[in-house]
Image (spheres, coloured by chain):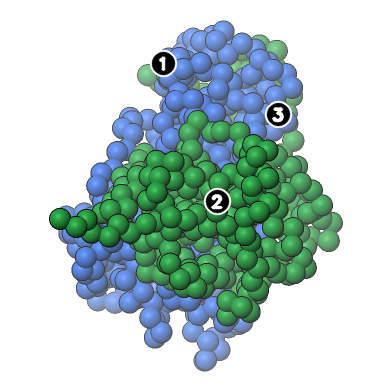
Chain colours: A blue, B green
Amino acid sequence: MLRLRPFLNVGRLHRGYASVAGPHALVLLEHRAGVIESGSLSALTAAQQLGGQVTGLVVGAPDQVKGVVEKAKKLKGLSTVLHASSEQYAHSIPEVVSPLLEKLLADNTPYTHVVSAHSSDAKSLLPRVAARLDLPAVSDITSLEHDGASNATTFTRPIYAGNAIATVRAPPSVRVKFFTVRSTAFKASAADEGAPAAEDKAVEPVEVSNPPTQHVRTDLTKSDRPDLGSASRVVSGGRALKNAETFKATLEPLADVLGAAIGASRAAVDAGYADNSLQVGQTGKVVAPELYMAIGISGAIQHLAGMKDSKLIVAINKDPEAPIFQVADVGLVADLYEAVPELVEKLKKQA
Amino acid sequence: MRPSAVRLLNILVPVKRTVDYAVKIRVNPDQKGIDLNVKHSMNPFDEIAVEEAVRLRERLKDEVKSIKVVTIGPPKAAETLRTALAIGADSGIHIEVPESAPAPEPLGVAKALRAVIEREKEGVDLVIMGKQAIDDDAGQTGQMLAGLMDWAQATFASKLVVDPKKKEADVTREIDGGLQEIKCRLPLVVTTDLRLIFPPEPRYASLPNIMKAKKKPIQKLTPADLGVELTPILESVKVTEPPKRVGGGKVENVDQLIAKLKEAGITPVKS
C-alpha cells in the first residue's frame, strides 16, 4: 500500500507550478553489522530540507540488506526504501556499485538529488558516479537551500580547512545534484514508530563481470567506546603522550569516567600512539561533540578544522602559548601527567 | 623460452599549486574569495604523490619507464612543476589558464586529465594524485577521473605495492574505522593519504636535482588544445568567514576545571 505523506518543510519552496516537479532525493543509507550509519541519518535530514520526496537506498550483500531495510522503513520522512542485494555489494567497491547508481539515475530518472554522508565509502563512490553521468558534485556541505521555483540548490561548505565558508549554487542545468553531507551539521534522523512504514522496493543488482578491483581484507579497530564520529564527548590526545602505552594509560581512564570516545591529533597517529581511525582534523574525522578535551595537543590549524565546532572545548597543555588555548573555552596550563590523573580521581568521586 | 614483453609503467602525477598550508587565511571584505597575495606551494597531498612515484621507481627500477607531472594553472604554476621535476619526475605538462580565470572544478580537471592521458602515445598505467587539495577540500578529482576512464580506483592510499609484470597493484587504504586492503588491475588511479609517505620527509630538492630540473621538458598546452571547457558549472556565490571562536579564560587548577565542567552540565558517568 502506498504510504501517503504530506510534503514536509514545504513552506515557501513548493509553489505548485505544473511544469516543475518538486525535488526527489535519493539518500544512500550506509550500514555496518546490520546498523544504519549515523552519518546516513544526518544525510537523510539534509535531504528532507530540500522540501520534497525522499527515497532511501540500501545496497549490500543479501544477508546484510534485509535487516537494514526493515529498520530503514521506519525512518521519519522516507517514502520508499529501494534495495539492491548481491554478493558483489558486500564491500563498498565503487567500480562495482557505480553501475547500479548510473542505472537508477539515467536520463529519465525521477531523482533530482543524490545525497550521502561524507564517509570514506560514499565519497569514494559518489564522485565516480557523478562524473560518469557528466555531472559535478558538492562535498561536505554544512547547509542547503533549495529554490523550487528555479530548481537551483545552494549549499555552504567549508574550504581552506574550515577557515572560510564557500556558498555554491548548483544551477537548474545540473539535472541531478550530487552532494555529501557533513554529519556534524545535521541532526541524525530518527525512527518514527507511530507512522506507517515506508514501502520497500527491490532493485535488480547490476552485476559487473570481471571487476578491476577486489576486496582483500578490512581491519576495523575494535572498541567498546562510543564511535568517535558521533560521540557526545571526546577525549583527544596529542604528541605529548609519549607512546602508545602512555596514550592509552593516560586517556582511557578519563574517557571511561566521562563516557567519551577517544581521538588523536595527526602527530599522535603519525608517532604510532593511536590508530589512524582516531585522527581528528582537516583530513581525518570532523567532530562536534558536547565536550572536546584536547590533552597535550598544540592546536595546529589542521587539527582545529576537525573540532572547532564542538560545543565546549577544554584544553590541558603545559605550554601557555599553545594555539589550542585560542579556541578553548576552558584552558588549564599544567603537566597533563599530573592534571589528568587528578581530574580522573576527582571526577570518579563525584560519580 | 622467450620472456614475454614486460609492460613498463608510465606514471602520471597531477599536481596543484595551492595557498601554502601554514598561511593564515584571510577572507576578503568583498566576500568574493580569500587573500591570494600569499605564499603558494604544491598541495601537500600532491607532494606525497610525486614522492611516491619517485620511490616506486627506486623500488621497481627500469620497470618504471616515465614519471610525468601535469598541472592546470596560471603561468606561476610552472614553478610547481619545476619542484616536482626536482624531486624526480621526468617531464611536465602545463595546462595554462589565465590568472583571472575562475578556479576549475573537479569535473573539469578530470576531463582535462582524461584528455592528457588519451594524448599520451605510450599510454598511462598509473595515476597517483592527492586525495584532496587543501584549498577547496573537495576530494573528488581522482574518483571522477577513474570514472571517466572507467579505470580501477584506490582512494586514501597509505600503502602501494605495484607489480608491473602482473599489471596489478595492492593498495592499503585508510577508511572510517580502520584500514582496508584491495587488489586493483592496472590502469589505476590512486589518491594519496597522509601516511603513504611515512615518516613524513621534509620537502627539499638537492641543488644538482634543481639544476637538472631546469633542463627537463615542460610542454605547454591550453584547455582548447585538449578540447576541454574549464569554466565551472557550480557557481560561487560568496566566500565568508566562519563563525568566530573566541577562547575562554584559563583556570588555575583541576578543581576549577571541574567546576567549569559542572557549570556546562558535564558530569561523570556512573561506573
Foreground residue among B68 and A214: B68
Residue A257 visible in this rendered orientation of the protein: no
Foreground residue among B139 and A103: B139
Q: Give the SS element for disc 3.
A: helix
- Say which residue label 1 marks: A245
Q: Residues within 10 Å of mark 3 (few under 14, many from 20)?
A: some
Check if mark 2 and mark 3 are on a common chain: no
Residue A342 percent coordinates (x, y): 54, 9
- Say which residue label 3 marks: A323
Q: Residue furthest right?
A: B29
Q: Chain of mark 2?
A: B
Residue A57 percent coordinates (x, y): 33, 65
Residue found at x 46% / y 65%:
B145
Residue type highlighted by circle 3: Pro
Tell me if B98 is positioned left or right of A269 in this view: right
Check if mark 2 and mark 1 are on a common chain: no
Tell me if A278 is positioned left or right of B26 in this view: left
